[in-house]
Image (tube, rainbow, N blue to C red):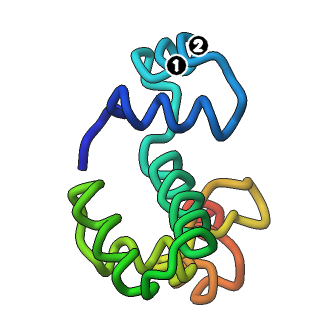
Amino acid sequence: MKTKLTPQELKELSLLLKQDEENLQQLNEYGVLDVIRTRAYLIEAEFKKLSVESKQLKQDIVMQLARKYNISVSSIEVVVYSKHINKKCNCNTCGSKVTKYKYRKNAGICDDCKST
């Protein structure tokens, strides 16, 4: 996966968020933007827009987005249809992120808090 957003993605993001493109570009350069979530937001917004505006089948739109963003069809489906894989949860004690598996296994407590 790419570590930075492309200029085209930054342009689309600035239109969606109604923010200055230069500010977003600086945030991208500093590595402050979460690239994966930002791309997911862009993909979801574009899917909604295309599904309303065009008469294409949803699967065709998914294929089109997969080609545009150069990622797999299943990755697009995960974003579009909210098929979250390996959801993150927060520890009830310290608030650190843990996987859903660990959250259920340890009754909502991370390994560090469990060992102390």
Mark 1: give few (<14), some (14-19) or many (20+) Cα within 10 Å. Answer: few
Q: Amino acid at mark 1?
A: Leu
Residue 106 marker: none
Secondary structure found at label 1: helix
- Residues under labels 2 and 1: Cα distance? 6 Å
* Callout 2–callout 1 Cβ contact below 8 Å: yes
Task: Out of 89 and 26, give the one closest to the viewer.
Answer: 26
In the rendered view, tell whether residue 60 sits above or below residue 92.
below
Task: Residue type at mark 2: give it.
Answer: Asn
Picture coordinates of residue 86 (x, y %)? 47, 77
Left or right: 72 in relation to 35: left
Check the image and report above or below for 68 versus 100: above
In the picture of the structure, the residue carrying the numbered disc 1 is 27
Q: Position of residue 110 (x, y in %)?
A: 60, 67
Between marks 2 and 1 in the image, the one whose residue lies nearer the viewer: 2
Residue 51 percent across, percent down from the top left: 56, 75
- Give 44 or 101, whichever is nearer the viewer: 44
Q: Quadrant of residue 100?
A: bottom right
Question: Residue at the location (37% across, 76% down)?
Answer: 62
The residue depicted at 69 percent of the width and 64 percent of the height is 90
The residue pinned by badge 2 equals 23
Q: Is residue 107 visible?
A: yes
